[in-house]
Image (cartoon, grey):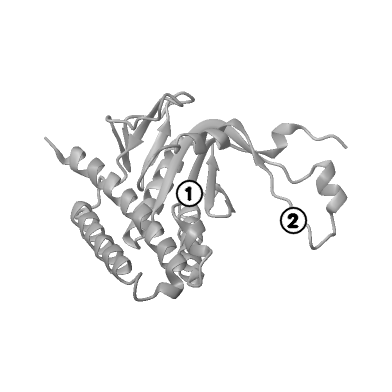
Amino acid sequence: MARDFGEFRLGSWVLTLDLLGTAVQMSEDDWFTSLNALLHTVDVSVHEALASGSGDVHLIQYGDSFTFCHDKVEKLVCVGTEVQVKLFRQNILAQIGLSGGGAYYLDDTTIHRIVKGLSHVKLHCLVGKGVARSHMVLRGIKGPRFIIDEEIGHVPASGPCWEKLLLGPNLHGALHCSELRWWKNFPGILEMTEGRIKALQSKIKYEKAGIKEFAHIEPLVRREIDSLTKRLKHYECFHQVLVKDSEP
């Protein structure tokens, strides 16, 4: 029996949270550390979605990304801000992209019916313009940022839990975007960021010094250095944003 496509609709606004650096970390022996960060993010996301008011924020997790959907953009912005703050305090780097355009979760198609009852087949299908655009706004972005698609829908310049940063990122003409100042009520974030940069620099220096000593595991060490260097780049780019934002 045919179903109306609107029955699959989750919301007109889509917020995507993408964890940074989990792929490399999850591929090494110490993958439990990355798994712990992922599970912590699931926990934080679920609690914030439930605490958003009526508990009607749709939340879908796939891999290292999380998608929140709702018709009220203010609710998604507040949820995203709280999640970002809590993750940053735990030294978990994430990027958030917000767009309009809608999201649809397809769980009743011909293929779903064919594989119904097969325990070894799991299908996941989240589609919609908003889903794609919420990922697109993060292209080329470094650091734990909150980027808003300005081409679809309108997000006020400020609200009960947010404030836009007028100096938006350069997205090479992909989409016209703005940035959310999610750190607005986060005292000491600049100093915290600087401390983490120094810690990463020291860790990279230590790992490089040990390459000769542990030549038998050089490929593993070099992958670790590469992962740490990418993480450092994210923090350095975010530090530039914070410094510029603090200028009079």
Q: Residue under circle 1?
A: 18
Residue 23 x %, y %: 51, 57
Residue lying at 46% horizontally and 26% vertically, measured from the top left: 174
Label 1 Cα neighbours within 10 Å, binned few <14 / some 14-19 / many ≥20: many
Residue lying at 37% horizontally and 61% vertically, measured from the top left: 225
Residue 25 x %, y %: 47, 63
Name the amino acid type tagged 2: Lys
Asked if residue 33 can be seen in this view, the reply is yes
Q: What element carries label 2?
A: loop
Eyeballing the image, is 93 above or below 199? above
Residue 70 x %, y %: 54, 40
Query: In the figure, residue 89 lies in which quadrant?
Result: bottom left
Count of all numbered marks drawn on residues in the image: 2
Q: Residue under circle 2?
A: 122
**What is the distance, in whole Å, between disc 1 and disc 2 at their CAs?**
22 Å
**CB atoms at circles 1 and 2 under 8 Å apart?**
no
Query: In the figure, residue 166 lies in which quadrant?
Result: top left
Name the amino acid type tagged 1: Asp
Residue lying at 32% horizontally and 40% vertically, measured from the top left: 162
Asked if residue 92 can be seen in this view, the reply is no
Residue 67 x %, y %: 54, 46
Q: Is mark 1 on a helix, strand or loop?
A: strand
Nearest to N terminus: mark 1 or mark 2: 1
Mark identifier at residue 70? none
